[in-house]
Image (cartoon, rainbow, N blue to C red):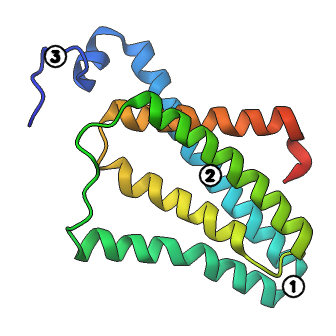
Amino acid sequence: MPRSPDRPGNLESARRNRPLTYAINRLVVVIAYAVVVGLLLSAVAQAFAVGLEVGLRSLAAAALPPIILAYSSFFSRSVKPPSRVLEVNLFGMALLWILVLLILVDFVSGQFSHTLPLGEFLISLTLGGLFYFGKRLSSKSLLSCSYGVLAGFLIHILIFGLWSF
């Protein structure tokens, strides 16, 4: 159902009535995507620093989720997100997912010395999910996920420090 132009939750209404809030919210979405892309690139680069075979396995693990999600997006119309999702739940789920993801990446890279590219796979899956569901969620839901990603990333930095990656 299309939104009416006068509806307060409409993105165009926010752009006209509160341009600074709109710009900050857009910046949060871009930064959230950039954080996940940066984590993925860092993990793949570290794997290539260990060795060519490890780097190629890491790159393969990073490429697998986008391929699966592209297939699902273009050739399968059966996956439909819920029509209404509470933004608070999305914020909490994104925050917890990023915390668990970063802790898992730290653990896997420390334990297995880059021989198991599980971290790269999960980071790539997260990025693919952001792109896949980003087009299907409302702007409020996407913004809530983005704030959750940033909050989880910052909490991880507060607890474990920046150099744990």
> Secondary structure beneath disc 3?
loop
Query: In the displayed structure, does residue 39 sit left or right of residue 131?
Result: right
Badge 1 crowding class, 10 Å Cα cut-off, few under 14, some 14 to 19, many 20 or more, is: few
Which residue matches tag 1? 51
Q: Quadrant of the N terminus?
A: top left
Q: Amino acid under label 3?
A: Arg
**Residue at the top extreme, as displayed:** 17
- Rendered image quadrant of residue 96: top right
Of pointers 1 and 2, the one earlier in the residue sequence = 2
Which residue matches tag 2? 36
Which residue matches tag 3? 7
**Residue at the bottom extreme, as displayed:** 53
Between 88 and 157, which is closer to the camera in this rendering?
88
Between 109 and 42, which is closer to the camera in this rendering?
109
**Can you say whether 51 is above or below 36 in the image?**
below
**Can you say whether 92 is above or below 76 in the image?**
above
Task: Tell me which residue sits at (46%, 34%) in the image.
Answer: 89
Query: In the displayed structure, does residue 99 sit left or right of residue 143?
Result: right
Of pointers 3 and 2, the one earlier in the residue sequence = 3
**Can you say whether 92 is above or below 128 in the image?**
above
Q: Amino acid under label 2?
A: Val
Q: Quadrant of the C terminus?
A: bottom right
Residue 26 bears which disc, if any? none
Task: Tell me which residue sits at (90%, 47%) in the image.
Answer: 163
Q: Amino acid under label 1?
A: Gly
The x and y percentages for residue 27 are 51, 31
